[in-house]
Amino acid sequence: MSVPYEQTGRHRQKARTRAALVEAARRLLADGTDPTVEDAAAAAGISRTTAYRYFPNQNALLTAAHPQIEQASLLPPDPPADPVARLDLVMTAFTRLTLDWEPQLRTSLRLSLRPGAEQPHLRGGRAIGWIEDALTPLRDTHPGLDLHHLAVAIRSATGIESLVWLTDIAGYTRQQAAETMCSSARALLVAALDRHDRRTGQA
C-alpha cells in the first residue's frame, strides 16, 4: 500500500506546506471562487508540481479545505438533562458555526450541486451526530422514539441549506435566519414528543 507523500520524510515541513495549501483554498472559497489545485498553489506561493503531490485533484483539495470541527459534541460541560434545553444549546452552537463558515459552506454547497459533482465532505453527517447527542436522554424517557429520524428531520430545517434559503429567498437577516432555524429545531422536537406521548398514552 502506498504511503501519502506528506507522511514520508521531513514531516514538519510537509505539514506546513499542506496547511498552507488548505488555508489558501479556504481563503479562495471565502471569496466565492472554485479553487483548483493550481489556484491554491499560486495563492500559497507553492509550485504546482508540489501542490499536486498533496492533492491530486480539486475534490481532494476541497475535501481537505472544508471546515473540520472535531468535537463529538457541541454541548458544554455538565449539560442539562432536559432534551429541549440541550437541543437549544446545540442549535445555538451549530448555527454559530454555520454563520462563521458561511462563505466556505456556500461555495462547497454550490460546487456539490454541479452535474456529476462528488463532494463527500458535504455528506459527513456531523451535525446529525451532534443533534442525536442532544437527544440522548430521550432513549430512557421516550423508548421507541426514533432519535436518528428525528435528528435528520431537525437537520433538514437547519444548516447552510436553510440559511441560504432564509436569507436569499425569504429575505431574512442572518440574525432572523438563525432564530428561525433554532425555533424550527425546537418545534420539531416538541411535535415529535407530543406525537410519541399521544401514541403511547404518556402523560
Image (cartoon, rainbow, N blue to C red):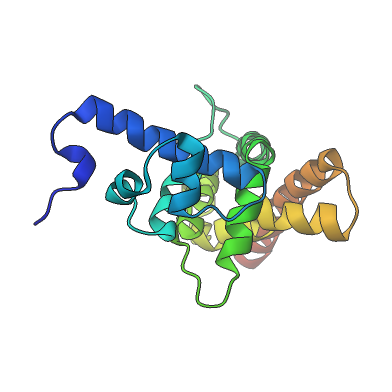
For the point 83% across and 38% down, the residue is 175
Instruction: Name the foreground residue: 120 vs 8.
Output: 8
x then y, percent, for residue 193: 65, 55
Q: In this view of the protein, can residue 25 be seen by the observer? A: yes
| Quarter of the image with the N terminus in it | bottom left
Residue 62 in the image, given as x and y percentages of width and height: 47, 52
**Image label count:** 0
Question: Which residue reaches farthest top?
Answer: 77
Q: Which residue lies at the image location 67% right of the left edge and 40% below the top edge?
A: 95
**Residue extending furthest toward the right:** 171
Say which of 92 and 171 sits in front: 171
Residue 69 appears in the figure: no
- Residue drawn at the location 58% of the way across and 63% of the way down: 111
Does 53 sit left or right of 137 as displayed?
left
Q: Nearer the viewer, residue 47 or 9?
A: 47
What is the quadrant of residue 10 in the picture? top left
Residue extending farthest to the left is 1
Residue closer to the observer: 133 or 139: 133
Query: For the point 42% across and 33% down, which residue is it?
Result: 20
Q: Position of residue 9 (x, y in %)?
A: 13, 33
Image spot of residue 197 (x, y percent)? 65, 58
Q: Quadrant of residue 114?
A: bottom right
Horizontal relation, residue 172 to residue 100: left or right: right
